[in-house]
Image: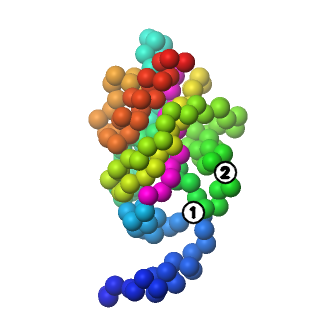
Amino acid sequence: MDRLEPTELAAELDKYDPGYLPEPLFLSIIRLAVLTAIEFIPLRKGPNGAIQVLLFKRPAEDPIWPNMSHTPGTVVRPTDATFEDAFVRLFQDELHMDNPIEPIFVKTEIIQYKRGAGTAIEYIIPFNQEPSEGIFYDIDNLPLDLIQEQKPMIISAAEKFSML
């Protein structure tokens, strides 16, 4: 198949509604453009006093990070009116929390992920309950299957958390 001219490609993309994108289309766009993501780093002090982070497993069929551990995150969608709309998605869909906790801002940075660059707006989520999903890990003993681009983000959030 020949490469589409930019105007033809734009006409094809115009057929999609703003919002959630099918995965193949999302992966192509994120490779070409820097998108903004909200990254939640759920932290707590464990029984031994060590700071712990709550991590989740990506599905086996994930095209970039199959079965890898990660922190909750979501790309800001064009249908989001505010960042809080993305927060609600994270609290409901990933953390399964009906009563959200006030996120604590850590920093904003551009991260070069395996799937493309992203602007990450990072927040600590103080987590004082047992999760319905995911596993807590001591910051000093993170799993080997952690998405490696997230490790510095987790460490800097833990440093800030230790000062709260």
Q: Main SS of the magenta segment?
A: strand
Q: Look at the numbered disc 1 and give the secondary structure of its residue.
A: loop
Q: Residue 48 lies in what quarter of the image?
A: top left
Residue displayed at 63% across by 48% down: 83
| Crowding at mark 2 (Cα within 10 Å: few <14, some 14-19, many 20+) | few
The residue at the far left in this view is: 144
Q: Name the residue under label 1.
A: 20
Position of residue 77 in the picture relative to residue 145 (left or right):
right
Residue displayed at 32% across by 88% down: 2
Q: Is residue 72 visible?
A: no
Q: Look at the numbered disc 2 and give the secondary structure of its residue.
A: loop
- Going by the numbered disc 2, the residue's amino acid type is Thr
Image coords of residue 133 (percent x, y): 52, 36
| Crowding at mark 1 (Cα within 10 Å: few <14, some 14-19, many 20+) | few
Position of residue 99 in the picture relative to residue 104 (left or right):
right
Q: Start and end of the magenta stretch?
A: 34-44
* Above or below: residue 141 compared with residue 91: above
Q: Quadrant of the C terminus?
A: top right
Residue displayed at 43% across by 63% down: 33
- Going by the numbered disc 1, the residue's amino acid type is Tyr
Say which of marks 1 and 2 sits in front: 2
Q: In which quarter of the image is the N terminus?
A: bottom left
* Above or below: residue 138 compared with residue 6: above
Magenta span contains residue 138: no
Q: Name the residue under label 2.
A: 82
Q: Residue 141 lies in what quarter of the image?
A: top left
1 and 2 marks in contact (CB < 8 Å) = no
Query: Observer-nearest residue: 82 or 28?
Result: 82
